[in-house]
Amino acid sequence: MEETLDRLFLDFSARKLQQLAERIETCLGKLTEEQVWARSSENENAIGNLVLHLNGNVRQWIVSGIGGAPDIRQRDREFAARGGVPIAELAARLRATVAEAQTALGGVTRAQLAERVAIQQYEMSVLEAIYHVVEHFSEHTGQVIFATKMLTASDLGFYRHLRTQAAHGERTP
């Protein structure tokens, strides 16, 4: 059966959110509570804030804005937190939110991709909203990965397979 362009986009978006969430979870597993909530200055976000922010963003834009669930986001709280959410809970929330988003994406039809939605104060197509969320999630995942490497001085191993002799002809995904 030939895959359609709409399903390729939707399924890839769901898989990419899963992959990025797993990378964040790997990072969280290498950090202490103190490291997760550390800030060098008040104009920086701690890793914990970024995880709360990604939960809020994905829930508002995909689970609510596209999937139709109530929008209960309190964005300012995502950045105001200075701890109080244990690492295991941060990881569990992120995992649950991404699973809900995957369910919502699984129900999107080809016709719905072109429908207009209003999320926050932005009007866009469903396709644009999904693209925005995946890009936004990726950006903050990169920040979490960078901070984790800085805090632990460790290689997280996400591209370990490219270190082998056989990998010289491979492309990084």
Image: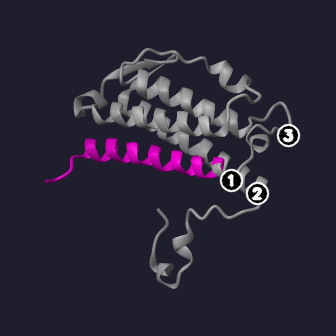
Give the crowd class for mark 1: few <14, some 14-19, many >=20 residues within 10 Å.
some
**Cβ atoms under marks 2 and 1 closer than 8 Å:** yes
Q: Is residue 162 above or below residue 55?
A: below
Q: Is residue 5 among what the camera can see?
A: yes
The residue lying at 43 percent from left, 14 percent from top is 70
- Disc 1 marks a residue whose amino acid type is Lys
Left or right of residue 115: residue 173: right
The label nearer to you, 2 versus 1, is 1
Please give the residue where the numbered disc 1 appears in the rendered image.
30
Instruction: Determine the CA span between mark 2 and mark 1.
Output: 8 Å
Q: Earlier in the sequence, mark 2 or mark 1?
A: 1
Please give the residue where the numbered disc 2 appears in the rendered image.
152
Q: Position of residue 144 (x, y in %)?
A: 66, 46
Give the crowd class for mark 3: few <14, some 14-19, many >=20 residues within 10 Å.
few
The secondary element bearing badge 2 is classed as: helix
The secondary element bearing badge 1 is classed as: loop
Left or right of residue 91: residue 62: left
The residue lying at 77 percent from left, 28 percent from top is 82
Is residue 15 located in the magenta-colored stretch of the structure?
Answer: yes
- Judge by depth and name the residue closer to the eye, 52 or 166: 52
Give, as a single range, the part of the protein colored magenta.
1-28
Numbered disc total: 3
Please give the residue where the numbered disc 3 appears in the rendered image.
40
The residue lying at 55 percent from left, 45 percent from top is 138
Left or right of residue 53: residue 121: left
The residue lying at 54 percent from left, 37 percent from top is 92
